[in-house]
Image (cartoon, rainbow, N blue to C red):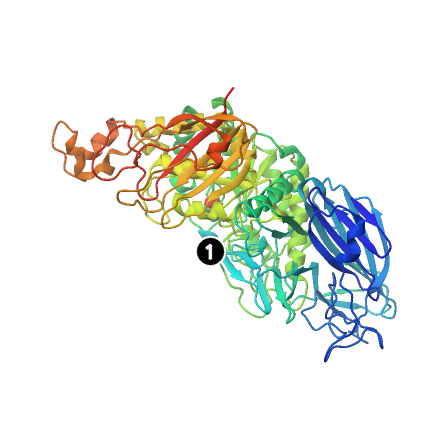
Amino acid sequence: MIEILDEEILLSTKKTSMVLSYRNQKKLGTYYYGRKIISKEEIPSLIRKYSYIEGTEINLEENKPYTEDLLKLDLSVMNHSDFNSPSLILGNEKSSVFDFVFKEAKIISPSIIEGLPTPHDAKEELLVTLEDSLMKVKADLHYVLYPEVDVIGRYLVIHNENELPLSIRKAMSYQLPLVNHDDRIFSTYGHWADEFNADTHPVIHGRTLIESLTGSSSARHNPFFMILEKDCNNISGNVYGFNLVYSGNHEYSIEMDTFDNIRISQGIQSTGFEKVIETNESFSTPMGIMSFSYEGTNGLALNMQQFVNAHIIKPQWKNTDRPIIYNNWEATGPNFSKGKLVSLMKKAKSIGIELFVLDDGWFSSRNDDSHGLGDWNVNGKKLPGGLKSLSDECQKLGMKFGIWVEPEMVNDDTKLYKEHPDWIIKDNIHIPLKGRHQYVLDLSKKEVQDYIIKAMHSILDNADISYVKWDYNRNISDIPNGFSSFYHDYILGLYKVISKLTDDYPDVLFENCASGGNRFDLGMLSYFPQSWMSDDTDSYQRETIQRNALYGYPLSVMSNHVAAKTSNQLLRKTSLDIKFDVAQYGILGYELDLNDLFKNDLETIEDQIRFYKENRKVLQWGRYSLVSEPSEKEDLVLEASLDDKAIITQFHSLQRPNPKEGHLKALYLEEDSLYTYKTRPQLIPLKKFGNLVNYIAPIHVKEDYILSVALAKHVKMKSEVDEGIASGSALLSSGPVLTQEWSGVGYDEHIRLVSDFGTRCYLIRKKI
Ligand code: DGJ
């Protein structure tokens, strides 16, 4: 709800309040953001009263105790009385001094941001206009409310009413003042195959600036971050979460001044940025996202996850069952034949897969990554009958068919490059640099946008294609003008293309990919409802990626695959069951050579798929939470919960000798309900026992000898199964005791043999 009061504005969501005020010298600021207040009478107490201005500060007005430096501003500029980092830098040929003051506030119907993705189904919107009448520039601050998920969106529109052009060098989507409580910053960092690592570090006096300059939102630093108050943990304490609905270069800044006031801002990356707007032109920033929870990081995660599902994902994909995918990339790379694909399709169908995806290598001369990108004609030698014949084959089998594309890029041996060398990004002075042997097409050009749309139309119109994996595999370099809005214009061009394509093909499921998670953000998710999270399919590595991403993103957008037992990325060996326990949280897929698997393994996958289908709703649309952090003594434990079900997985790092008693602990269940719980059984690889297998084998088996492989092929050994009944209260406390863990002295069917990097998954259901 939005209430415009006398010089104050109260924004209320389900559990939070934000108080804006322009009482002090008509300067707009946020004086309170936190738990919901209960009465308007409280508002005056939340706003600081100033009597004197101290030391070297500059007076906004002679003999008045106000200086912008100490007011809790929602928009700040340089060259006036604020000496903290500004959220807006602009100027014209005559001046770069600005004095923005409140002009008006009104409630409007939720708006659409021109050219940029706007979260849908907002409830209410507040528009506050600030103005510098001498400079003839207006700043519109939009506050957009998503009350049921406790999210407030903010964006800024600058209008130039001056006869001189206005240069904008920095325009953050929001600026939010906060009070410091020994706050910590949670931010993420990463790179190819190692996305979403987390840093938690104190807010320091001065400024922490985190940014991406790669041309995309990037795996280096995802735009999602949190500010945690001192005692905040996963289940309690105050926490603020932030994000940006944007896919290009971005930055966020956390600044603490010398009086311990905190100022948060986020927006389009400002280094090298310049946008010049002429008389009567405007410039809009993307929308920034803010949320607060007093229920710890899982509380914040719930807000963010619900926000993405309800307001970012296109409505037609909301709550719909996403198909289980088979993707051929890790099995074949770009070298395959039609015969090989058809045999994989048949195997995939036989184990329950619902959609077959043909990855890179189906077009032009593409047999490795230095050829063919940009010429989107099928390689008839590899695939006689084209995509149509493959999609028909899938149809016959009762599976859907999907393909991989990377339309923003080009290799230099292509017809496209030869005909349009000027379509790539380059400065026309240097030899443009390649990444993965390819150039980036300049999507700020209309003709390039039109080409991509046409090429995609021709692919999608000529075969029965239900899914597209849209890849993007290098950073941007060699931009023609380093002091411009080029990177932003590229992203606007991209949004034009993908908005048109997703409108033209509303039933095609697009999956976002950028060498894994290099453009995993709310902008891309506004068009493509799911995203490949990482090229790292090693399960242990992937746990970290998923665990840190869950604070900002829901299960429904996280696409994960079970790959071969030996990880291509780390050569770490883990069983298919362990891989499944990780990959099941989100959109499940398989990405290994199914023809290389033993019958045992195929049966294992069939069981997994059956389990996933039975629990798909909770695994795709449930609340995704961290039950416990991993430590020397504790496992990482994750939970997906929805209605009367929860799926809890305990993830081991290293096996401990003679370990302590194990318990099953859950988080988001009803205290006074009874639940049943049961282990999802795993197949224990016999080779795991090494020489100890001779305690049970009728003949002597040497470790690593051919016989041990043969045994693995035929002997099916199931893990222990823990099952029982427990109340929500017990599960929320220490939880039921699990069977004894392997301790090196004896083994029977009750022993819980988890091992290094191992997992145990439990299905909890309300008892009826
Ligand atoms: C990078 C993606 O992340 C992979 O999954 C795969 O599609 C390759 N590109 C293909 O080139």
**Label 1 residue SS:** loop
Q: Residue furthest left?
A: 700
Q: Tell me where residue 480 appears, x and y as whole percent.
A: 63, 66
The residue at 76%/49% (across/down) is 11
Within 10 Å of disc 1 (Cα), the crowding (few <14, some 14-19, many 20+) is few
Q: Amino acid at mark 1?
A: Arg
Horizontal side of 686 relative to 66 (left or right) equals left
Horizontal side of 265 relative to 558 (left or right) equals right
Horizontal side of 679 relative to 402 (left or right) equals left
Horizontal side of 403 relative to 744 (left or right) equals right
Residue 141 in view of the camera? no
Residue 39 in view of the camera? yes
- Where residue 720 sits, quadrant-wise, is top left
Q: Tell me where residue 619 appears, x and y as whole percent.
A: 51, 33
Q: Please determine whether, in this image, residue 138 is positioned above or below residue 308.
A: below
Q: Residue furthest bottom?
A: 56
Q: Residue furthest top?
A: 768
Residue in the foreground of this view, choosing between 102 and 454 = 102
Residue in the foreground of this view, choosing between 47 and 483 = 47
Residue in the foreground of this view, choosing between 687 and 713 = 687
- Where residue 59 sits, quadrant-wise, is bottom right
Q: Tell me where residue 734 appears, x and y as whole percent.
A: 43, 37
Q: Quadrant of the N terminus?
A: top right
The residue at 57%/67% (across/down) is 204
For label 1, the residue is 436
The residue at 65%/70% (across/down) is 259
Q: Tell me where residue 36 appears, x and y as whole percent.
A: 71, 47
- Where residue 100 sits, quadrant-wise, is bottom right
